[in-house]
Image (spheres, rainbow, N blue to C red):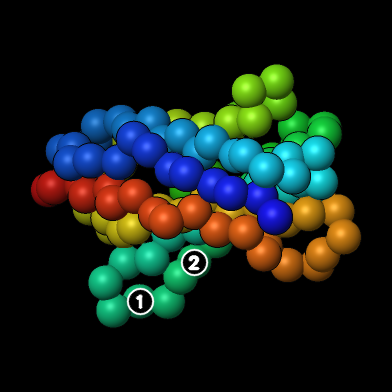
Amino acid sequence: QVQLVESGGGLVQAGGSLRLSCAASGRTFSIYTMGWFRQAPGKEREFVGRIRWNTGSTYYADSVKGRFTISRNNAKNTMTLQMNSLKPEDTAVYYCAARSTDTTDYSNWGQGTQVTVSS
């Protein structure tokens, strides 16, 4: 099992920036991919982006491409989501998740952190 804890959410005005962090512990050696997801009120959870743990390659949803950047620090077992040019529609609870080398799904999830973008 990998335990995940997010931090860094908050309230920001449209056009502003926020930085979320996700700290991983436990079986971190088994991490293959880590990702960010979000869920707005009344909506389904949606994929934001992911990073391959070994190579650092990233992939983003079209809705955040060019505005959000995912990075990781393997030595500290942390992942960061830098969010720029925030829009009110980015308001959601943001979750980090981890997929291990022996699974095909994101099986480990954090508790979530609220991001609110005011217009």
For the residues labelled 1 and 2, say whether their Cβ atoms are less than 8 Å apart: yes
Residue 49: x, y in percent? 58, 50
Location of mark 1 (residue): 43
| Camera sees residue 73 | no
Q: Secondary structure at mark 2?
A: strand
Q: Judge the density around disc 1: few (<14), some (14-19), many (≥20) Cα neighbours within 10 Å.
A: few
Q: Viewer-proximal residue, 87 or 57?
A: 57
In which quadrant will I find the N terminus? bottom right
Q: Is residue 32 above or below residue 54?
A: below
Residue 92: x, y in percent? 31, 58
Residue at the image position 78 percent from the left and 54 percent from the top:
100
Horizontal arrangement in the rendering, residue 17 relative to residue 5 (left or right): left
Residue at the image position 32 percent from the left and 66 percent from the top:
40
Q: Judge the density around disc 2: few (<14), some (14-19), many (≥20) Cα neighbours within 10 Å.
A: some
* Quarter of image, res 47: bottom right
At label 1, which amino acid type do we have?
Answer: Lys
What is the total number of numbered labels drawn onto the structure image? 2
Location of mark 2 (residue): 46
| Camera sees residue 21 | yes
